[in-house]
Amino acid sequence: MQFLYEREPGRREAESEVVAAGEQEGRPFVELSDTLFYPEGGGQPADRGTIAGAAVLDVQRAGGAIRHFLERPVAPGPVRLVLDWARRFDHMQQHTAQHLLSALAEDRFGWKTTAFHLGPAVSDVELAVPALAEELRAALEEAVAAEIRAARPVRPRRVTRDEFERLAAVRTRGLPDGHAGEVRLVEIEGVDLNTCGGTHLASTAEIEALHLLASEPMRGGTRLHFAAGGRARRRMAAHEARNARLRGLIGAPEEEFAAVMAAKLDQLQGAERRARQLEQALAEATAAVLGAEAEASGRPVLAAHYEDRDAAFLGAVAKALSRRPGTRLALLTAGPGPAGPFVLVAGADFAGDLGALGRIAATALFGRGGGSGGIFQGKAERVDRGEAAREALQEACEGTAGGAP
């Protein structure tokens, strides 16, 4: 049976009848006496729309029937079908563009299409060519543009299996397993004759435009991404809008974007290097201050909090402290709170169990952590408990032989 989506691919609304209804894997579905809705297949996604006001969520073949999966059940009887025409026309543009692209890639350049995918924003074909140089991609795009301008008619038709076998110029990747009956062909006059069950435009002129976006290696061939019709125009509009914003931000015309951004990146990288150097100098100075404070106070454990610093800064200070002679401990916390990073660091001569002491600090700070090499670090849920953690550490050090200074 030829369904309405095949007989009249430009039809947007129709009357039909629900001849069967049911549920599959928790999804309600209906089968219709005739349908506007194309079922997923051949690289083309399923149509969307409504049946009796219920949204069509998916359309799939089930044996010889077509099942329309709906947002809610619909009872048997007469129903009105409304197609999401914008989605359908977009798919027709992309699918017809693919036929034209594949035909020209093979006939003009010798690159056979091995796969096709119609995506939601970008489509692609896989071509049997290891790589695609930029000049060849441009030549292929120009060949497609010429055939779009030629406004070549696009016509579907059906032939018997015997007639199909006698046709020498049919482009096909083979009929589906178990196929019986007539074979549907789609012809682009003078360019292509292809086996296909999808929906297509009436003329290559309706493709409007096609732009080849990028290519990448894929399974020994090349995947070529493209956008046609309304998608190509929308991409151009988005591109122009981005360029307008960039002109305002960069303060330069488009042809100077790359040079200006390269210069700004160099400046940024230089600034980042200087910032890292300053951060390291600050960490060394902070470690020196803490070391001097430890020597002056005689305390076995110090605690310090840095509200506007992060874990990287604590780590740099801890490394500097770990190289200083002595046996004292320093508990460092950072961040505006309540949670934040913490580090417990021991001096170069410390002989105690830093892992055990780190777990004591983590418990006091309601956090967790781990470490080695004279540094224990982690995440605290309460950085405001630094003094309580320091006291717990000092008590542990005083009660452990060899752990005290």
Image (cartoon, rainbow, N blue to C red):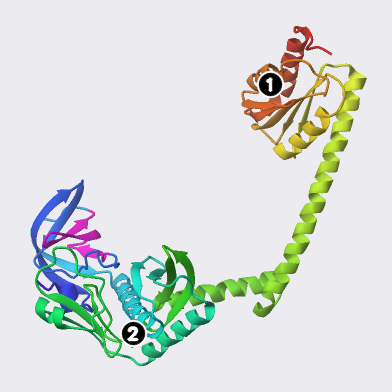
Q: Which mark is on residue 135?
A: none
Residue 365 versus residue 192 in the image, above or below = above
Q: Position of residue 116 (x, y in %)?
A: 34, 69
Residue lying farthest to the bottom in this orientation? 150
Examine the rendering and report whether any part of residue 6 can be seen: yes
Examine the rendering and report whether any part of residue 160 can be seen: no
Residues at marks 2 and 1, CA–CA distance in whole angstroms: 71 Å
Residue drawn 77% across the image and 53% down it: 272
Range shown magenta: 46-71
In the rendered structure, the answer to whether residue 403 lies left or right of residue 35 reads right
Does the magenta segment cover residue 101? no
In the rendered structure, the answer to whether residue 272 lies left or right of residue 162 reads right
Does the magenta segment cover residue 59? yes
The residue at which mark 1 appears reads as: 358
From the viewer's side, name the closer residue of 375 and 261: 375
In the image, what residue type sits under mark 2?
Glu
Report helix, strand or loop for mark 1.
helix
The residue at which mark 2 appears reads as: 206
Closer to the eye: label 2 or 1: 1
